[in-house]
Amino acid sequence: MMKTASRASSITRRKLLKTSAAGAALAAFPAPLIAQTKPFAGVTLHGASFQHRFFTLLQKYIPEFEEKTGMKVDLQLSALPVYNQQANLELSSGGSAYDFVNVTFTLATRWIAAGLLANLDEFTGDANLTPVEWNPKDFVDGAQVPYRDGKGATYGYSWEGGAMLMGLSRMDLMEKKGLKIPKTFAELAQVCAEINGTDGVNGMVSWFLHNWNLPPYIQGFGGNVFKNPPGDVMPALNTPEAIQGVEFYANLLKSAPKGVLTYTEDQARQSMLTGRSNIFIHSSAWVTPILLSDESKVKDTSRVVRSPAGPVHDYPASNSQGLGIPRNAKNQKAAWEFIKWALSPEISMKLVREHGHSSVCRRSIITSEDYRKLNTVNGQDLGALYLEVLELPGKGENYMAYRTSKEFPIVGDVLNKAFEQVATGQLPAKDAMNAAQDQAIAALRRAGTKL
Amino acid sequence: MSESGIDGERRRFIAFALTPSLIVLFAVAVLPAIYLIVTSLTPFQLTTPGSATDFSEPLRNYGLLPGDPRFVNSLAVQAKLSVASVLFQVLLGMGLALLLNVPSRFVEFARTFFLIPMVLPPIVVAVIWKLIYAPDISPLYYAAQALHVTLPALTSSVDFALTSIVIADTWEWLPFTFLMVLAALQTIPDEYSEAALVDGASKLQIFWYVTLPFITPILVISGMFRLIDSVKAFPLIFLLTGGGPGTLTEVTNYYAYLLAFDTNEIGYSSAVTVVMLLLVCGISLGLVWMGQRKKALA
């Protein structure tokens, strides 16, 4: 009995000694030991994007992510043009300053073609790095098209979707005049002309990026910016359809406020929210505030619908912004961990539920009951509209291919200038677009594009 | 120590004293300029690997410039903008200096007040004018509406876009010529005008025969400075018109900016910039030569 007691006492003492030693070691070196439980302890992840509400909201949750993974996230946000310049220079010069970046929609093809981004299929294809529940196929296909190469490999996952919709702020005026919501280009022109000037309201409003606003009209008449993008990038600016589209949009802007050619998106949105302009056709995030924003003075008289269809095509523009990993990033696995977390169904749903952020790109979220409830206003299911437009380029012809062609910035700039010449009456549409065609070809050849 | 020894010592000291400044100047001005010239000899595109070191056709960019209508147009726009804004700045600055060249507390306050636009950061000036020119929020348009006057949208109007830049640029830099001329006016001895007055000269004659000859060199110098500086009207154009409508306000440096940062044609943009640099150097040297010639003739 005594022996047993002595042995028991001895074991206890040994255990006690061991435990004390372990405790002392833990007290002396706490961090490394704790770090072993966190896979990315000590890693500082450098990321960059342009300023956007998505990141402002995400930053609220980043401490939770840092706590979970042990890594520190250094997220640099700057204005869109500044960010594009910085990221373009950094990636093109083979720099490794960023571990993850926003893959700006218009730069996506150029970056992918130049091999500046890491292939994310290597991460999603590895079960150790990506659980099945993350499901890359949950992202709306139309939003993912810009982030794939010719072979279908993925270089970015979209965090923001933009679907061109039409907002009407003064349905009361339209009803008084017996006008219906326009569904075709011809009806749109008629409504704009008839409302313009009524009670000091402008028929429509737009903003200065004509190479975003104009192509849906060119395509609606059956034209395009290039002959057959992305395979054939010969500019097609002086086709009869393109000229017709330019003339049509220039005529529409006669119903817009003075100075609309230099309007920013904010100015245009403000014009809608205050009911000074009746129609605004732009991305959902800019149009839906007439129904959703507290600033809106026209909530009761507003509608958000599909933008009107052209006589040949119904091609509302759409875009997306994606997160990707630079090829030379130092912390690729950590960067993937961040992207996976930021675009997870859980965070996406949190953003929708807690902040009403609706421009997410996960189909499971957009089609969820919670999303539908939050985005149905005055009986209008904005989520369904958003999804419908966002999906279109992924179905059948990818009509947005013109915009992600790496030649687009050059041709888009020429198109902007030509349109302004037409809208201000400097040149007839035919002359302006013929000159634009020549200039676009010359500029592309100068830049080394083989046409 | 011999005479030549002292001279040698002086020369060595001067060289020693100048060396740090020259090294800094070389690093911040000459090296980037060399890089610019070297880049202009390549087809450098950000997303085309190897293009930064491709010297196979070194003069290709320069050969393309005369056939580029936007480049040629940008030079013409720059010339119009520079001539108009410098002319207004010199004439209005001189007029204002003549008005305010009197001893008075109010005038002293006014002088300080007039300096404000010049010390504001250029982008702030651009934002101020953006607000003034925005039809839906501008007090200018409210005032016009109250007076039943219809103003066009100045920055997107074919007839007024360039004028709107000239007005904003003149507002910003008028104080410079004003200050220069005011300083010159204060160095003119009163005896000359008093003598002319005794001889029965009118105020206009005093200005023409006494004041103007005194301040002419200052007018030329301030005009020269402003002419060289006028190629830097970038923030105003960037924020107010974006070079439009069309290419009506697209000056050469704005075109170079678009080429470099919108379409990534760094090599071609560098060639545009080099030509602009040469033109500015040419104008500066021409004006210096004119000044020296005038001095020699005198």
Image (spheres, coloured by chain):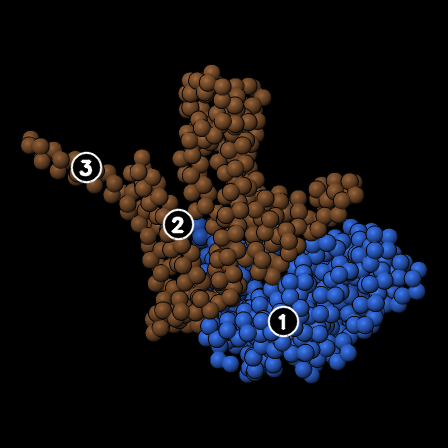
Q: Quickly name the residue at label 1.
A: A431
- Left/right placement of residue B207 relative to residue A339 reads left
Q: CA distance from mark 3 to mark 2?
A: 34 Å
The type of residue carrying mark 1 is Asp
Return the residue nearer the eye: A142 or A198: A198
Is residue A318 placed above or below B202 in the rendered structure? below
Mark 1 on the same chain as mark 3: no
Coordinates of residue A230 in the picture (x, y in percent): 58, 80
Q: Quickly name the residue at label 2.
A: B283
The type of residue carrying mark 2 is Ile
On residue B13, which mark appears? 3
Return the residue nearer the eye: B265 or A189: A189
Coordinates of residue A267 in the picture (x, y in percent): 70, 53
Q: Are marks 1 and 3 in contact (CB under 8 Å)?
A: no
- Crowding around mark 1 (Cα neighbors within 10 Å: few <14, some 14 to 19, many 20+) is some
- Crowding around mark 3 (Cα neighbors within 10 Å: few <14, some 14 to 19, many 20+) is few
Q: Residue at x 47, y 50 (%)?
A: B231
Q: Is residue A91 visible?
A: no
Q: Residue at x 84, y 65 (%)?
A: A191
Total numbered labels? 3
Q: CA distance from mark 1 to mark 3?
A: 67 Å
Q: Secondary structure at mark 1?
A: helix
The colour of chain B is: brown
Which numbered disc, 3 or 2, marks the residue that appears first in the sequence?
3
Q: Residue at x 41, y 24 (%)?
A: B187
- The mark lying in front, picked from 3 and 2, is 2
The colour of chain A is: blue
Coordinates of residue B90 in the picture (x, y in percent): 50, 38
Mark 1 on the same chain as mark 2: no
Q: Quadrant of residue A151?
A: bottom right
Q: Report in which chain the residue with disc 2 lies.
A: B
Q: Quadrant of residue A138?
A: bottom right
